[in-house]
């Protein structure tokens, strides 16, 4: 496995470069990135809906249950169309879900910290995590556009770090590959 990874070091390098380019674009124009992400989601929902309806048709032809596929496909197509024609609604729903998730997660983290304080030391980290989650959720509800842009910024920062790490790994694998080639060349001259 390490030899295969070393031999294909360039693939990791390309992934790293792609992640860094994505990060630069995301951080340079976060509003456009947000709009594109919403449209990609809409395209996914639409295509997924079409394939679900195709599955419904095939299931009906094979005399198998098809109703759930038809319902799933119809909902997917409707969500895709709503996303394309009313992207603001999609953004509001997605942002609302992220905010609700952050608050609910934070409450559960606080509850876990209170229960665990008798059993572990350092529960303050869990309390801090819960508080940050709750504050982030409140911030996103209070300022949804800024919250959405914060999410895009985090995505861009993640992609940048991920890309740099992949490039670093690819360079180490490239060195390993070159060393294995040198060892093979040395062994064949003996």
Image (spheres, helix red, strand yellow):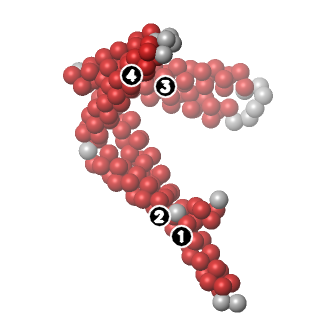
User: Is residue 43 depicted above or below 77 in this figure?
Assistant: below
The mark found on residue 102 in the picture is: 3
Q: Earlier in the sequence, mark 2 or mark 3?
A: 2
Question: The residue tagged with tag 4: helix, strand or loop?
Answer: helix
The mark found on residue 174 in the picture is: 1
Tell me residue 94's x, y (percent).
37, 24
Q: Residue at x 34, y 28 (%)?
A: 47
Mark in front: 2 vs 4: 4
* Residue 88 showing in the rendered view: no
Specify few, some or many for label 1: CA neighbours under 10 Å numbering under 14, 14-19, or 20 or more: some
Q: Earlier in the sequence, mark 1 or mark 4?
A: 4
Q: Earlier in the sequence, mark 1 or mark 3?
A: 3
Q: Residue at x 47, y 59 (%)?
A: 11
User: Front-most of 82 and 116?
Assistant: 82
Total tally of numbered discs in the picture: 4
Question: The residue tagged with tag 2: helix, strand or loop?
Answer: helix
Do the numbered discs 1 and 4 sit on residues whose CB atoms are within 8 Å?
no
Residue at the farthest front position: 62
Q: Earlier in the sequence, mark 2 or mark 4?
A: 2
Tell me residue 164's x, y (percent).
46, 58
Image quarter in which the N terminus is found: bottom right
Q: Residue at x 62, y 83 (%)?
A: 185
Specify few, some or many for label 2: CA neighbours under 10 Å numbering under 14, 14-19, or 20 or more: some
Q: CA distance from mark 2 to mark 3?
A: 38 Å
The mark found on residue 54 in the picture is: 4
Tell me residue 37's x, y (percent).
32, 35
Specify few, some or many for label 4: CA neighbours under 10 Å numbering under 14, 14-19, or 20 or more: some
Q: Is residue 72 left or right of residue 8?
A: left
Q: Residue at x 32, y 34 (%)?
A: 40
């Amino acid at each position: 496995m390490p030899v295969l990874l070393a031999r294909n070091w360039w693939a990791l390098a390309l992934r790293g470069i792609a992640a860094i380019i994505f990060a630069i674009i995301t951080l340079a124009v976060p509003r456009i990135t947000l709009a594109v992400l919403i449209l990609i989601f809409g395209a996914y929902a639409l295509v997924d809906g079409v394939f679900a309806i195709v599955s419904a048709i095939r299931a009906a032809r094979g005399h198998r249950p098809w109703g759930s596929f038809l319902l799933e496909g119809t909902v997917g197509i409707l969500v895709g169309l709503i996303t394309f024609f009313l992207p603001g609604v999609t953004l509001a729903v997605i942002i609302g879900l992220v905010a609700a998730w952050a608050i609910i997660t934070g409450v559960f983290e606080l509850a876990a910290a209170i229960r665990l304080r008798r059993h572990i030391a350092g529960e303050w980290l869990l309390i801090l995590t819960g508080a940050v989650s709750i504050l982030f959720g409140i911030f996103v509800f209070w300022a949804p556009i800024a919250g959405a842009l914060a999410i895009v910024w985090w995505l861009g920062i993640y992609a940048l770090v991920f890309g740099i790490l992949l490039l670093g790994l690819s360079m180490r694998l490239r060195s390993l590959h070159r060393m294995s080639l040198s060892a093979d060349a040395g062994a064949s001259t003996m």
